[in-house]
Image (cartoon, rainbow, N blue to C red):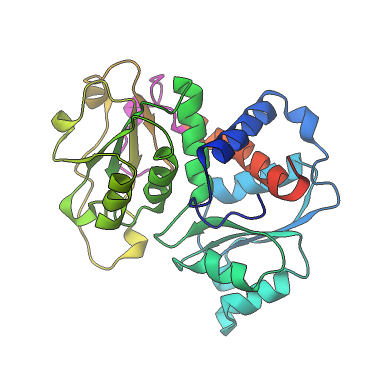
Amino acid sequence: MDKLLDCKKFTKESLMELLELASKIKAHPENYTEELKNKVIAVMFFEPSTRTRMSFEAAIQRLGGKMIVTENGKENSSARKGETLEDTIRVLDKYADAIVMRHSRDDAAIAADKVSRVPIINAGSGKAEHPTQALLDVFTIMNKRGSLDGTKLAILGDLKYGRTTHSLLQLISLFDNIEVFGLSKKEFMLPQEYIDYLSSKGIKYTVCESFDDLPRDIDVLYHTRIQSERFEGDFGKEEFIINKAVLDTFTDKAMVLHPLPRNEEISTDIDDDPRAMYFEQAENGMYVRMALLKDILAGK
């Protein structure tokens, strides 16, 4: 792999190769401490982040690389003075061997790639995609189930503006016998383009109106917070909250995932339930990003 702009380039085979590498790194991280020796990675975030930014920074350092970092690029870079994204990239690519970037523009990664001489890694672009999040999501599902084939996936919350679900659907659609169920307020329903995409892959998408509409043997409950920073107005609080009472209506094999941060959509009363896997999911992000950086910058 020479860069990561979105999830469209993945095949089932290339995705499984990367997930298998992440598994090896997670099992023996001490074997990979010099993979990025003498490499410098620019970490440029124009939007707030905790897990994505810090797991990338941890991944770089654990692989023996070095970083140049801007945490709040919107305020702490020349973007505040009016510099275009393209000009910023034209400068950064002279300082670094790769650029990890988050931006509010849907097309930010593609625009950056057009002018960059070094690999661009999309760490979140507007409401469009978050490919590295989707990688750690499928990695977590695979680790729990042993396989991604036959997954019954429920996506909940903000399916309109939530870029994590948009990327996840593209990766999960590479596998066989997938079923997807969507539960959200009408203002946050999954855009038709993603429903059509699933249909083109032979995957039926079922719109649900309550938790009762979801199969009791669901494999994954993937919740997302309302992305209030991406729209104007107030659509109220989340209606579909996973708490202990709700989770106990599903089987023991169900897992609850969330890209975090959470608000009220997942109750803290399930944090100690073995089906609540969002903190393990966050940990997996570091290993998956280590695998991605190694693949792009140090070869397989």
106 to 65, vertically: above or below: below
The residue shown at (51%, 24%) is: 143
Residue 110 visible in image: yes
- Which residues, given as a range, are shown in magenta? 261-278
Q: Main secondary structure of the magenta part?
A: loop
In front: 130, or 54? 130
Residue 159 visible in image: no
Q: Is residue 168 magenta?
A: no
146 to 179, vertically: above or below: above
Q: How many discs mark residues in the rendered view?
A: 0
271 to 201, vertically: above or below: above
Residue projecting furthest to the bottom: 82
In front: 237, or 7? 7
253 to 100, vertically: above or below: above
Q: Position of residue 21 (x, y in %)?
A: 66, 32
The residue shown at (59%, 54%) is: 4
In screen coordinates, is 72 left or right of 187?
Answer: right
Q: Position of residue 118 (x, y in %)?
A: 71, 63
In screen coordinates, is 188 left or right of 42?
Answer: left
Q: Position of residue 175 (x, y in %)?
A: 42, 34
The residue shown at (28%, 41%) is: 156
In screen coordinates, is 266 left or right of 122?
Answer: left
Q: Position of residue 213 (x, y in %)?
A: 15, 32
Q: Is residue 262 magenta?
A: yes
Q: Quadrant of the C terminus?
A: top right
